[in-house]
Image (cartoon, grey):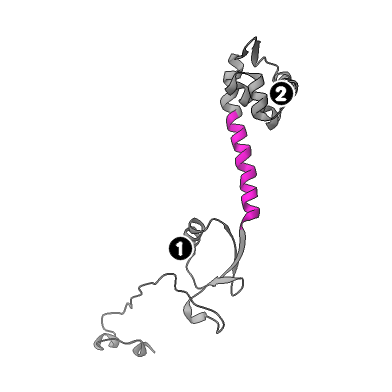
Amino acid sequence: MDIRQLKAFIVVFEERNITQAAQRLYLSQPTLSATLRQLEDDLDVVLFIRQARGVEATEEARLLYPQARRLVDQAAALSGQFRQRQQRMPLELGIDDDLGASQIERFLSKASQASPSILLNIQAGCCGDARLAAEESRCEDELFLPLWEEAFVLALPAAHPLLELSPLEMAHLA
C-alpha cells in the first residue's frame, strides 16, 4: 500500500464513481481500477462493489476512509514542512553569555512567531549575521537596536553609607 493508492481510494470514496474519480485524478479509468485492485489485494478486502452507475462503498471502505484521509494529510504536511524549511532564509544569531535564559527564550519565541520564514541558527558568542548582546558589548561597526529594557534595583543593607546620598547617581557606585 502506498500514498498514491490511498489518494485514489479517497477520491473514489468521495465521488462514488470511477469515471468521475479518474477525471479528478487525471488518470485513465483502467489505471484507476488497477490501482484500486492493488490496494484491495494489499489489504485483502473488497472496498467497493461495482454497479452499473458508480460504486458502493463497503464497510471496510468506510473504516479505511478516515485513516486514509489522515495518512494522506500527514504525508502532505510532512513534505510541506521540508519544502518550507528549504525556502526559509537562514540567519546566524550569536548570543552573548551574559544574557539570561528567560530573555533568550522570550526573544526566540517572539522571533519565530513574527517571522516564520527565517531559519535561526543559534551560536554562542560574538559571531553570526546578527547577535543578542548588551549595548556595552557592542562593537564600533555594529548597529544597536534595543529589544527590551530591564528595571534593575540596588539592594543595600540598612546601615550602608550610600543610603545617605539622595539622589543616588551611577557615579556614586563607582
Disc 2 residue crowd, few under 14, some 14–19, many 20+, Cα 10 Å: many
Q: Nearer the viewer, mark 2 or mark 1?
A: 2
Residue 168, picture quadrant: bottom left
Q: Which of the 4 quarters of the picture holds residue 155? A: bottom left
Q: Which quadrant is the N terminus positioned in?
A: top right
Residue 21 percent across, percent down from the top left: 64, 24
Q: Horizontal placement of 167 versus 74: left or right? A: left
**Magenta-colored segment: predominant secondary structure:** helix
81 w.r.t. 66: above or below: below
Magenta stretch holds residue 41: no
The residue tagged 2 is 32
Apparent side of residue 6 relative to residue 141 in the rendered image (left or right) = right
Q: Nearer the viewer, residue 52 or 106?
A: 52
Earlier in the chain: of badge 2 and badge 1, it is: 2
Q: Which residue is mark 1?
A: 102
Question: Secondary structure beneath disc 1?
Answer: helix
Element under label 2?
A: helix
The residue segment tinted magenta is: 69-88
Residue at the limit of the structure toward the top, as seen here? 52
